[in-house]
Image (cartoon, helix red, strand yellow):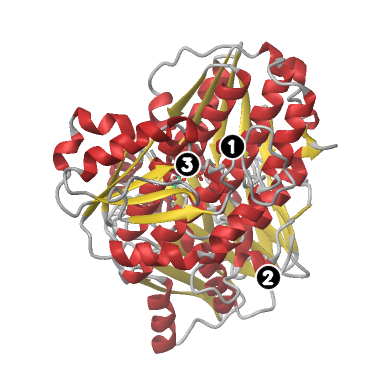
């Protein structure tokens, strides 16, 4: 995945592009570049490395002076990160930036080579510049774009400059996001809204195959046949502060701190008269009563959020739920049909495998429900129904607040599901909802006591390998805690269902290997403690994450992280007693502790947690 931007207006274009790229750097950060019309001639500056390297290069070489241009921040797919492979790419009369993958680039390259074109990079993107040039013989940019996109297979969002048309930007897309920002006499294109949020909140969405032409006179949209179309102007409900660090050293830490607030905001949007109500999106009690099976399909952290949702829905509503990895689901010929509900969970709403799973589920007649944070995304727009989570922009590559609101929404759904199917009475739905409203306070408490997580991080900073174990909800949390840790610390980490370790993996346990045991679920606590003891007996260092009041036999636990979420059995407890949470809801504060442990370990290891190596925020390729 990459980020693209474009600008035309009265400001210094290079500054606006760099500013926008900084907001999109989460999409890729192995190289960057800009191309600007400088006195009617396109000047390109690009380099390998993070945006900081680009800023240094601009400072050393002098930035291009002008008011119209395009920019790119790259996550390499074809060709290693290098100056040559960085975007923009030019050939002849055309300069482009590209986000996506051109699947038939090899055959197009052969065709273009026969036509006399030569290539300097190893990218699939350079082919697009050549093909545009090939179709540009009549010097009609719109026609050249229309002819070119007919030949492209795969996904793309393209920002395009034609050298004969200074101060004009063209753009088109298919499968990859592209948004047109509409300011006062200034216009933007971008992969995501934060890139221009500082200048305008108004935007229009480009649909697949549409083309936009922007010059000082304004913006014109065209369909695939070149017919001009009108677009609806929308207004972003995000603030610029949400897309900035606001004094925090990293986006990840800021986003962890935002969690109490975004959980409450998401809940407020889903709850009416004290209970979850999804009738506004068509998810009525009648519909929920008729569902035979549920599939939750997602990738990475979103999939682990789906596991929490599975435990909650099955426990309360007694409907079978399968959690599927999207990249598997799309190719496994799943047995899914019209009585099934397929829930697609995604922060970005643009994850390629999740989009393909959505299409597959729809083609089999299943009803689809998106749980998505970016409301203008492909998944949000493509699903039959959409729960829009309100985390706001999540910039750090490691997902934190998006996971938190995903599980919040899935809990709310579980409560309504259970009520609709007659498994719990209205009073219990109300009580559970009130309990969920206790979560922000419990999460805040974990954040306020973050020094305990910092201490655990200090014990992990030099380890080479570690394990997470847990049962039920704690197993789902272990998977997420382990992913978060390895993603941003590069420490090898594996998560296991606590009872599974002794079926092979326990042979890896030796003296001093940390085993983070998530032990919040009282119904399985005794069993988890036995598993803890098994690894302790083989020399492991045990770090227990549990309720504050949980007691362990002397010598079992080396470090205890006790969460302040009430020690009394939840049965019959009043929601008004502060942080008290039902066991089922403990994942909300617990995951916050695991996120903080990962964050501080990353920082102590000298890694930038916002931009871990090899990763990009959204995975728009298979
Ligand atoms: O945008 P999505 O939620 O669909 O992304 C899914 C995963 O790629 C994502 O959650 C990934 O695992 C995170 N970087 C983990 O922190």
Per the image, the residue denoted by label 3 is 520
- The relative height of residue 432 versus residue 21 in the rendered view (above or below) is above
Most foreground residue, 50 or 555: 555
Report the mark closest to the observer, 1 or 3.
Answer: 1
Most foreground residue, 328 or 4: 328
Q: Circle 2 — which element?
A: loop
Mark earlier in primary sequence (1, 2) = 2
Mark carried by residue 198 = 2
Most foreground residue, 33 or 414: 414
**Residue displayed at 73% across by 19% down:** 420
Most foreground residue, 417 or 366: 417
Mark earlier in primary sequence (1, 3) = 3
**Residue displayed at 15% across by 52% down:** 511
Cα distance in 3D space between marks 1 and 2: 49 Å
- The relative height of residue 484 versus residue 583 in the rendered view (above or below) is below
Q: Residue furthest front?
A: 554
Report the mark closest to the observer, 2 or 3.
Answer: 3
**Residue displayed at 71% across by 48% down:** 577
**Relative horizontal placement of residue 170, taking residue 227 as reference (left or right):** left
Q: Circle 1 — which element?
A: loop
The percent coordinates of residue 302 (x first, y second) are: 49, 40
Per the image, the residue denoted by label 1 is 569
């Amino acid at each position: 995945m990459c980020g693209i931007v474009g600008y035309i207006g009265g400001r210094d274009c290079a500054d606006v592009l760099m500013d926008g790229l900084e907001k999109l750097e989460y999409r890729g950060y192995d190289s960057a570049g800009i191309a600007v019309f400088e006195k009617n001639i396109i000047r390109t500056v690009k380099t390998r490395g993070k945006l900081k390297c680009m800023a240094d290069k601009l400072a050393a070489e002098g930035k291009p002076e002008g008011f119209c241009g395009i920019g790119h921040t790259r996550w390499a797919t074809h060709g290693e990160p290098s100056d040559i492979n960085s975007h923009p790419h030019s050939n002849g009369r055309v300069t482009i930036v590209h986000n996506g993958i051109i699947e038939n680039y090899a055959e197009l390259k052969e065709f273009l080579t026969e036509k006399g074109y030569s290539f300097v990079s190893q990218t699939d993107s350079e082919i697009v510049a050549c093909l545009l040039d090939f179709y540009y013989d009549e010097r009609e940019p719109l026609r050249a774009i229309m002819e070119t996109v007919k030949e492209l297979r795969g996904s793309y969002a393209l920002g395009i400059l034609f050298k004969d048309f200074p101060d004009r930007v063209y753009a088109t897309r298919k499968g990859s996001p592209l948004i047109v920002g509409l300011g006062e006499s200034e216009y933007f294109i971008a992969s995501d809204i934060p890139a221009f949020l500082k200048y305008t909140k108004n935007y229009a969405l480009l649909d697949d195959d549409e083309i936009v032409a922007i010059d000082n006179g304004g913006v014109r949209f065209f369909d695939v046949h070149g017919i001009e179309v009108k677009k609806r102007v929308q207004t972003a409900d995000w603030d610029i502060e949400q897309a900035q660090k606001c004094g925090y050293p990293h986006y990840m830490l800021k986003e962890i701190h935002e969690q109490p607030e975004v959980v409450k905001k998401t809940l407020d949007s889903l709850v009416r008269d004290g209970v979850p109500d999804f009738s506004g999106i068509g998810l009525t009690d009648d519909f929920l009563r008729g569902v035979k099976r549920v599939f939750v399909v997602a990738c990475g952290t979103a999939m682990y959020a789906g596991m929490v949702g599975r435990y909650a829905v099955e426990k309360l509503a007694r409907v079978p739920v399968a959690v599927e990895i999207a990249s598997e689901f799309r190719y496994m010929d799943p047995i899914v049909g019209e009585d099934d509900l397929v829930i697609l969970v995604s922060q970005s709403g643009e994850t390629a495998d999740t989009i393909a799973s959505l299409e597959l589920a729809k083609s089999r007649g299943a009803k689809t429900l998106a749980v998505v944070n970016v409301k203008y995304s492909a998944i949000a727009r493509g699903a039959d129904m959409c729960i829009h989570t309100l985390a706001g922009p999540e910039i750090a590559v490691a997902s934190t607040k998006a996971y938190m609101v995903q599980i919040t929404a899935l809990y709310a759904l579980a409560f309504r599901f259970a009520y609709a199917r007659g498994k719990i009475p209205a009073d219990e739905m109300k009580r559970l909802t009130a309990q969920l409203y206790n979560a922000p306070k419990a999460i805040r408490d974990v954040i306020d006591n973050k020094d305990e997580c910092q201490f655990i991080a200090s014990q992990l900073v030099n380890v080479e390998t570690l394990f997470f174990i847990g049962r039920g909800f704690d197993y789902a949390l272990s998977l997420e805690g382990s992913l978060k840790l390895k993603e941003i610390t590069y420490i090898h980490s594996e998560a296991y269902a606590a009872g599974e370790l002794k079926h092979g993996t326990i042979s890896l346990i030796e003296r001093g290997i940390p085993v983070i045991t998530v032990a919040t679920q009282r119904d399985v606590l005794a069993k988890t403690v036995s598993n803890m003891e098994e690894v302790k007996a083989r020399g492991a260092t045990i770090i227990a994450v549990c309720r504050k009041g949980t007691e362990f036999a002397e010598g079992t636990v080396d470090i205890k992280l006790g969460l302040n979420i009430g020690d009394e059995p939840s049965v019959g407890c009043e929601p008004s007693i502060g942080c008290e949470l039902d066991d089922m809801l403990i994942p909300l504060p617990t995951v916050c502790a695991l996120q903080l442990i990962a964050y501080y370990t990353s920082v102590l290891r000298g890694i930038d947690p916002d931009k871990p190596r090899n990763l990009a925020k959204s995975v728009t390729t298979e």
